Image (cartoon, grey):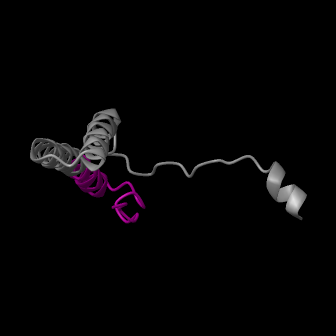
Amino acid sequence: MEAAEQTKIYQPKPDRRGWFDDECRKALEKKNAAYKKWIDRPISDKRMECGRLRNVVHKVCRNRKRTHMDNRVTNIEEASRTNKSGIHTRRMDH
């Protein structure tokens, strides 16, 4: 059994967040890099930069998620109006 577990190839779970794109990922990476710099040498300037980047990440991801959810709602409403059965009753991912 242990040999079988060792030979398994690691496959990360697919990202089901349709709103999380490269722009969100890049902003998050910049914020994480600034955080690591701040942790290495805690200076108030680095802390302020980390906080500013945290706000940027929050804003970018919030806008992407909002746009994605608005598009999903629009698609569901359109499917409901055109009577495409089943589409408007599917569970919406968060």
Q: Quadrant of the C terminus?
A: bottom left
Q: Quadrant of the N terminus?
A: bottom right
Q: Is residue 6 above or below residue 37?
A: below
Q: Nearer the viewer, residue 94 or 48?
A: 48
Asked if the stretch drawn in magenta spans residue 75, the answer is yes
Q: Is residue 53 left or right of residue 29?
A: left
Q: Nearer the viewer, residue 55 or 38?
A: 38
Residue 45 picture quarter? top left
Percent x, y of residue 49 = 13, 41
Q: Nearer the viewer, residue 10 or 46?
A: 46
Q: Which residues are magenta?
A: 68-94
Q: Is residue 4 left or right of residue 37?
A: right
Residue 93 picture quarter? bottom left
Residue at image location 20% in from the left, 49% down from the top: 42
Percent x, y of residue 38 = 24, 46
Asked if the stretch drawn in magenta spans residue 27, the answer is no
Percent x, y of residue 90 = 40, 63
Residue at image location 29% in from the left, 55% down from the top: 76
Percent x, y of residue 26 = 31, 34
Q: How many marks?
A: 0
Residue at image location 38% in from the left, 54% down from the top: 84
